[in-house]
Image: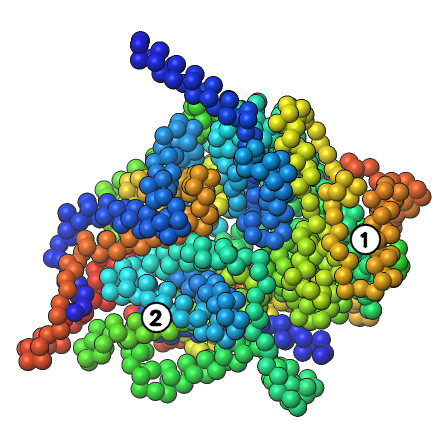
Amino acid sequence: MRLELVKRPQQSVLFSALSPFIAFALMVVAGGLIFLALGKDPVDGLYAYFIGPLTEVWSLHELAIKAAPLILIAVGLSVCFLSSNWNIGAEGQFTIGAIVGSAIPLYFPDLQNAAVLPMMLVCGAIGGAAWAAIPAILKARFNTNEILTSLMLVYVAQLILDWLVRGPWRDPAAMSFPQAPAFHSWAIVPELMPMSGRANWGIVFAVIAAIAVWFMLARTLKGFEVKVIGQSPRAGRFGGFSTARTIVFAFLVSGALAGLAGIVEVSGAIGRLQPQISPGYGFAAIIVAFLGRLNPLGIVAAGFVLALSYLGGEAAQIEIGVTDKTVRAFQGMLLFFVLACDTLIHYRVRLVRPAPAAAPAAGPTPATEAAHGHG
Amino acid sequence: MKKTLFALAATTAMLVAGAASAQDKAKACFIYVGPIGDFGWSYQHHQGALEMQEALGGPDKVEIAYLESVPEGADAERAIERFARSGCGIVFTTSFGYMDATNKVAAKFPDVKFEHATGFKREHPNVATYNSKFHEGRYVQGVIAAKMSEKGVAGYIASFPIPEVVMGINAFVLGAQSVNPDFKVKVVWANTWFDPGKEADAAKVLIDQGVDIITQHTDSTAPMQVASERGIKAFGQASDMIKFGPETQLTSIIDDWGPYYIERVKAVMDGTWEQHDIWHGMKEGHVVMAPYTNMPDDVKAAAAETEAKIKSGEFNPFTGPIMKQDGSEWLKDGEVAADGVLLGLNFYVAGVDDQLPQ
Amino acid sequence: MGMAEAILLTIATAATPLLLAAIGELVVERSGVLNLGVEGMMLMGAVVAFGVALATGSAWIGVVAGALAGMAFSLLFGVLALTLVTNQVATGLALTLLGIGLSGMIGVAFVGQPGVKLEAISIPGLTELPLVGRLLFGQDPMFYISILLTAGVMWFLFRTRAGLTLRSVGDSHSSAHALGIKVIAIRYMAVMFGGACAGLAGAQLSLVYTTQWIENMTAGRGWIALALVVFASWRPWRVLAGAYLFGAITIAQLHIQATNLADLAGLPGPLYWLAGAVKSVPSQFLSALPYLATVVVLVLISRNRRLTMMNTPASLGRPFVPDR
């Protein structure tokens, strides 16, 4: 007996809709089993994880704070991944965006008016895009593997930030501690509803970005180009699209959104540049992108789900005493389940018995290339 | 209307019940920057928390809650606020990077006490800051190193160029040169507080370059293990690391937060808590030397004598005459460095042969 | 022990885990599969090796357990990416995340415990030889395993029929399938070999490099190993060279820091000035050197399109579904 996949003639509409729910159900079962194995009550654990954080207003604000950068970055990554550009370095683009955006209030401290914040946001996006342009150009021009170059540049970006906040940009009033001066009030992303919590405009930017990119992908020629090149570069070239141009375009969009996320994070949620500004948003956003099935609107939902897993993990740590490591394990499992369930959209899975020896040979037909794969 | 009234009554009842339970049981909460199993900084804070709970009557009297590995970004504020909302009477935030977040949350919860370690910002009356004079122990280590080293060179694995670390290097060199004026120190900046692989590499490199004593201002036990494999001596950091180098560890500077946590949580229980900024050392028992091991009796005696002098307040490691590295005068004969200057220290004293990263 | 010899030994220890993980991944990629989960498999290998060595008191049993753990963990990737044809990039990333979390959960009890060290070998008469004695005959067993594995993979890939089959699967799974080769089965074996090698690399970290278990102790070495495979343009001996080059750069920047200017007082003027200039470079830039060097070398290698294309497995990362 073995497992066999049969390609469906068309994507299954049923499983397209059901797959995220099946994945989530599997996740809940597996999560419950983990809690049992840790000697905790699975119901308490799952409640603390997935429902508790949704029952308080301040916690919903925190959810928005956490989801905003994840969504912004993941929306950009969807453009990259759909065009088969494996940008693994969003974390670095996030960091450089934060740095370049922060340069405005740091170098022009006397500039205190309503123009500061928009300038910071634009500079942040430009910084992120510029950092993303490096692996893009290296790939387009020299065919250099973008997974590795973009990743190596993450470490470099973090070291640049570290050097800046410990050296040239260090706050003279901070007793030689590593942090840049706090932003003045014009340079801070405003909170949406300051009375009830600290969620800021970041989440609004994220949703707008998601809608804009969704529109671009679904309704414009550029979006078509991105998807065609991603599925088959040869067909794309045949249709008159340039692979190199698409590589650069995808990386620039993705880098700009990651950079925007970076400057929004430091100016909104943190308030200054400091050595550590991201708990790995750039990497977590890769999960969000796949969880949202590379659809910007799906990514909005996925961003909130992942943000929930962080908040829930923290609550579970306090309330039922599991370690912070379970959060990572849960996220990895969730991604596994989503990926596995998505197979059902394109394939029928069935168990087959070994064929009898006398069965007519099917003949050496060419193997089916899985058309849905983005790799 | 009836419904609203009922809800109101229920809320009041809950509040009253909450207040009552808060009175007979204190809740102290801790935020750690690393895993509590790092055997260094966060581990020692957690040990202090446990010691406090034990001393104040156990889990029936004091409830403790903690979050480990909390990143020093936007997550810190949420973690602190979660504690403030969950009935903690006092919240200890144990890393410099939590400074802004601590003060922000403190503004929203005036009834909760906040204690921030190693910071200097107290924007609200419910925020206190605390720190320890680890450099006092470094001076004692310097004395031991100069007496124990045959080559007259020690290796120093440093984390980041912040005042606490710079102070430590200076105190170590001053202590060593009080015994052997030609004593040298080789400094490697690991640019990390906790990365065993990198710390091990740094230790190996230093030993390859000929040092025969290793001291570290990073938190993992890897340098101790490398020193013991290579058969040289080393100093532990933050906790007693003797089981990682039974034949290797000379002594270790132990951060003992227990007495402080006992004092402060008790103050909250008694209603006598007040804002302050303290920087205590050996005298108050916040900095403790692990037993002097793997050294001859005369070195032991010299170390114990230095320790006793610092403890009694008779001697301060930063007492003039001390020159800066560039040769200019810092402290005149008999002059003692002011705490304010030390807490922002960003230069080396004469005798340190390293360039301070700027 | 002379200083040059000591430095080489330090570099060898730093390079060995990179080499072990990269040589395994090389075989995986030669079969046409891209498994980005190296970091996760290494962590699983490290934590299991440490725990088993601690429980049994034998570092060798720990090494074997580490390899098996890496292999078992890689099967998870196999089932998803090969049987269920999920996206390989995403699956590999999920494996890394799961590995970080799971190893942390398993390892909670091991934190802060001195482990069991896999001792260096000692051959009387040879180990004491001047200059080369310690280098050739006095290192830890993982060093020899890594070198033997590299030689073995070289021989297997380019001198055996099975190696040819594996490479043909990586170059064109459709043609290989048409020839009656069991593509999926071969890829499963390659993935498991890669997992075992990553597990060994993890075991080296927790039993040799630093004898302890710390969560996330790989600190990005799995990713460096992945970079090395491309850097080496899928050639085993170049993986070896790359791993040692990377190790050398890492150690060199620490040596620059540890060398005081006073140690160099005897140098001629210009050299002394140069040393002073290097010393005044911020340490963050020195730390960034290995990563920048990797990027530069990747560019240099990929510039030569013909050479790259010749060695790149053409089916790399592309899913394969057999047509019964």
Q: Which residue is drawn at 37% across and 64% down?
A: C73
Category of crowding for the residue at label 2, using alpha-carbon neighbours closer than 10 angstroms: few (below 14), some (14–19), many (at least 20): many
Residue C184, by quadrant, is bottom left
Pointer 1 local density, CA inside 10 Å: few below 14, some 14–19, many at least 20: many
Q: Do labels 2 and 1 share a chain?
A: no
Q: What residue is rendered at 54% in x and 57% in y?
A: C111
Front residue of this view, candidates B189 and B175: B175
Which amino acid, mark 2?
Answer: Val
Q: Distance between the residues labelled 2 and 1?
A: 54 Å
Callout 1 amino acid:
Val
Tell me the mark number nearer the camera, choosing from 2 and 1: 1
Residue C92: image x %, image y %?
36, 60
* C264, A66: nearer the viewer: A66
- A151 lies above or below C165: above
Q: In which quarter of the image is the N terminus of chain B?
A: top left
* Picture residue at 80% right of the left edge, 64% below the top: B295
Query: Which residue is tagged 1?
Result: B140
Chain containing mark 2: C
- Given residues A147 and B43, the one toward you in this image is B43
Query: Is residue A279 positioned above or below B223 on the image?
Result: above
Side (left or right) of B202 relative to A27: right
Where does the image place residue A341, in percent across and percent down from the top left? 23, 53
Q: Which residue lies furthest to the top in this view?
A: B1
- Given contact means CB atoms under 8 Å apart, are the residues at marks 2 and 1 in contact? no
Name the residue beneath numbered marker 2: C191
Of all residues, the one furthest to the right in this rendering is B333
Q: Can you see residue B5?
A: yes
Q: Quadrant of residue B201?
A: bottom right
